[in-house]
Amino acid sequence: MKIVLAYSGGLDTTVAIRWLKETYHADVISVSVDVGQKDDFKKIEERAYVAGASKHYLIDAKEEFAEKFAFKDVKMNGLYEEVYPLATALARPLIAEKVAQVASAEGTDYVAHGSTSKGNDQVRFDLALKTALDNVKIIAPARIWKMTREDEIAFAKEKGIPIKTESSKYSIDENLWGRSIEGDIISDPSIEVPEDAFELTQVRKNDRLRLNIEFDRGVPVKINGEKMNPSGIISFLNDEIGARGFGRVEHLENRVVGFKSREVYEAPAALALIAAHKDLEKTVLTPSELRFKREIDMLWSDLVYQGLWYEPLREVLDKTGDELNRWVSGEVKIEVDNKSLRILGRSSPYSPYSEKISSYNKGWYPTDEEARGFIEIWGMHSLLARKARSE
């Protein structure tokens, strides 16, 4: 029997290797997918073999994650509950897809992951794996073994398993698109998040940063005139914008699994790119298009967060978003300093803005007769209803 395990290298999945091996008398094949997390993958591989893995795969998916997931998030202004740019939620279907590919290559239907029964990731992993493998058998050890964190540490010591030593008191999940921070005192939503919880957005530079971000069909392609690949753009913005302290999210989040939780994120590049993209959309889209786009953005974000990446409606929304983003090309100027971001200006060849029409100093003015007629017709519904209800 072979079991393919989505392996992060952390405590849960490291203990899971030995637990799966002993519980199911199986060969455990560990798979680590690089989506931009700052990990030592060589040490992760060594840890997997010491824990009992019979084979280990490392898959570099950074560029695919940036282009096909993170930049799709930009085009759809993906912000769950208007604030969270879906970093963890977007990575899960890609990781599951890569793990499923290894399972197929290894000739097994048994796949495992480290999610608990209390989190959203179990939903995302299970549904993505069910989509990728027709006859998949999913094992989630942390939903079965009923071990506490202390129990897991004791199990690892008993078995001589080297676990990842973490100086942080927080639980961290990180990829190219963002960093999630949970645990310890920040679980209490009434307490201010301590500064030591943050990493990407620790203030390291006190100057003002000005950037020109160029978009082509809704996708960022250049920074200050320099063309970069998707992962390069994200990494650059995470470093430079994060160094000025911008990119923090703190909110009380409605989880898929039925309760609210205090969530803290760092996502400098994601929040900056989405802010610039939304501004450029507002520049080129008609009022009706813009209001419609905001509606589908919210629906798209909900589907992704809820683990429904493979929901057919999400694909329909993507196509609609692509069509509207045909015209979202141009440049947005931003300034970042003192933990804040401002839009300084924007330009697009597809903008219907006309200074000849909008300027108060020159150009077009409606006549008095035209203005009176427009106002009369525009307000007629409201005035007639108000009159009828006051009689």
Image (cartoon, rainbow, N blue to C red):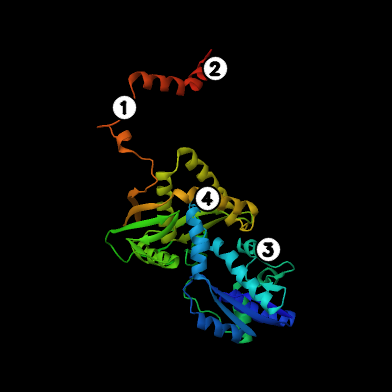
Say if mark 1 contacts mark 3, CB within 8 Å.
no
> Is 252 in front, or is 90?
90
Residue appearing at x 42%, y 58% in the figure: 220
The residue wearing badge 2 is 389
Give how far across and how far down residue 225 sits, in percent. Answer: 32, 61
Q: Residue placed at 36% from the left, 18% from the top?
A: 369
Tally the marks: 4
Residue tagged 1:
365
Secondary structure beneath label 4: helix
The quadrant holding residue 151 is: bottom right
Q: Work out how far the residue at label 4 is from the one at label 2, CA to CA, in angstroms.
A: 42 Å
Q: Which residue is rendered at x = 52% and y = 49% of the image?
A: 323
Q: Which residue is mark 3?
A: 131
Which comes sooner in the sequence, label 4 or label 3?
Answer: 3
* 228 left or right of 42 in image: left
Q: Nearer the viewer, mark 3 or mark 2?
A: 3
Instruction: Look at label 2 and name its amino acid.
Output: Arg
Assign a secondary structure to mark 3: helix
